[in-house]
Image (tube, rainbow, N blue to C red):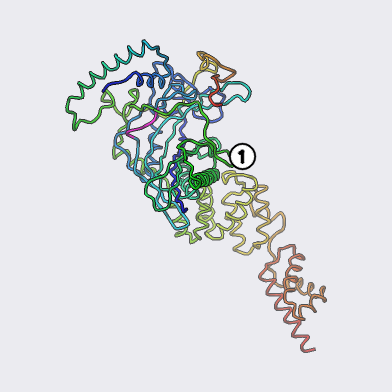
Amino acid sequence: MDFETVIGLEVHAQLLTDTKIFCSCSTQFGAAPNSHACPVCLGMPGVLPVLNKKVVEYAMRMALATHCAINPQNVFARKNYFYPDLPKGYQISQYAYPLAEHGYIMIDTGEGSRKIGITRIHMEEDAGKLIHDDHNPASYVDLNRTGVPLIEIVGEPDIRSPEEAAEYLRRLHEILVYLDICDGNMEEGSFRCDANVSIRPRGQKEFGTRTELKNMNSFRNVQRGLEYEVRRQQYLVENGEKIVQETRLWDDAQGVTNPMRSKEEAHDYRYFPDPDLVPVVVDEAWVADIRAGMPELPQAKRERFVNDYQIPAYDAGVLTADKALAGYYEDVVKLCGKPKIASNWVMGDVMKFLNEDKKSIRECPVSAKSLADMIGLIEEGTISGKIAKEVIADMYATGRTPQEIIREKGLVQITDEGALAKTVAAIIEANPGQLADYRGGKEKLFGFFVGQVMKATQGKANPQMVNDLLKKMLALRQAQDDID
Amino acid sequence: MKLSTADVEYVAKLARLEVSEAEKEKLTAQINDILRYIDQLNELDTMGVAPMSHAIAVTNAFREDRAAQSLEPGDALANAPDARGEFFRVPKVIE
């Protein structure tokens, strides 16, 4: 049977504020357990939460970046349930009147660009962290994360494959990071995803029974988890079994999903407006103010790179995948004026070194100025592209300027034709066997001669000049012999 | 609208409340009294009146994003029924 997959994703993104959403405790990750806690986030009786204005502003940025309509009035609500990571017995979230609704983002698929709807974006507080004791019937609770601001981005069930799901997440992640409102760290849980997935016979209008997947902490795991779940559901349907609506956890090590075992009762959250928090009214002036402060978004940057710098779409995609990398590249281009050559060096050697060291561009020892200088030195013929490979490795290792390295190592290209001609002549003299073979028709041996000249000059010879000289002198030998 | 004893049991369970049989009878009657009053209110025509979520007319009460001192280490745990080291300790929540 031919099935269609239907996926809808819910993303929770931690906002990069200094303090929690309803109190002045720090949001810094990695502090001693329960050291960022106060009567408000501990849910003590009689306390009053007060909304952090920056949370609203950050959430509005995301709403605008995803083409959502911002509700002029939005209201916080209590979501009631009992769990030890939630000291108040309810989570403050938004329900009937969220911050923003009816947006979308564009994703690239095999069949071109596609629009994925965003149902809503709302603000809420994070819960604490539980650590389970492996040997005793106990769990340990750290409430530092309790009250850290989140936005939940609820997507429409518009996604049709696990691959598209991963692409959608990458795009959302990229936007959040570009907006400077989320650090996007999936391992630390700053960016989390739950997926609703179902299958239906192709052509059927109604959705099939869905399962909810949790615990996928990388883009790759989201894709793998969904691929597994789709296969599992197809197997059930094809064997006449029923799909049970349930929450399942992705097990990365085993590569399977399992039903979540939890003592949590059936969910009946009994949402109601939180009387402690007054409504948030967003007028047009405030929206305009946020819009005016929005940075360039990844999609726009990619298009600008292709148009202004005339680099391939592929290059633009790689260079804009990280905002800091895009900034670095633009600095190099501004300084050297060679966009495509700059792209080759940044995407090639620079990124290779950084990947090997698992470093980000922010930690790159080669400054944009140094890289631009090096490209300038190649362009003016001071060093060859081959030598530049050696120079940039040194620049990366030592953080020195290319000028310093070239001077110290004596790497300046030999462009003195007279001197080079002598070397070329000597090489030809020194290899009579190869010369005879070359003249006998083994034209591949031309490369041998080039190699020998390069070796003799420690790679400093201007390659074009070597080629020209060799061609000229080998032809000359031929002509002389023909006369003899 | 009339609530049954089963409804009361369900709500009590959601609120993690233990209620005796006698209390269930009493609570069912009391809650139904309250709901009868609500029914009376429902007789009013509220078409065109926006639902009210708050009793005061204040909006946009914000604080700036500036960190302040949290509780001193240990104080957060001072009232906890059970703690171990820097953590609250609770009965295990997963099997």
**Along the line of sight, which residue is nearer the eye, B45 or B69?**
B45
The residue under the point 31% across, 36% down is A282
Give above or below for A208 relative to A311. Answer: above
Image coords of residue A255 (percent x, y): 59, 42
Please give the residue where the numbered disc 1 appears in the rendered image: A253
Judge left or right: residue A341 versus residue A422. left
Q: Amino acid at mark 1?
A: Ala
**Along the line of sight, which residue is nearer the eye, A127 or A287?**
A127
Give above or below for A100 relative to A272. Answer: below
**Along the line of sight, which residue is nearer the eye, A154 or A34?**
A154
**Along the line of sight, which residue is nearer the eye, B26 or A394?**
B26
Give above or below for A273 relative to A346. Answer: above
Magenta stretch: give its range.
A92-97
Work out which quarter of the rendered image holds the C terminus of chain A and state it: bottom right
Q: Quick one: SS at disc 1?
A: loop
Image coords of residue A137 (percent x, y): 59, 21
Magenta stretch containing residue A96, yes or no? Answer: yes
Judge left or right: residue A343 versus residue B5. right
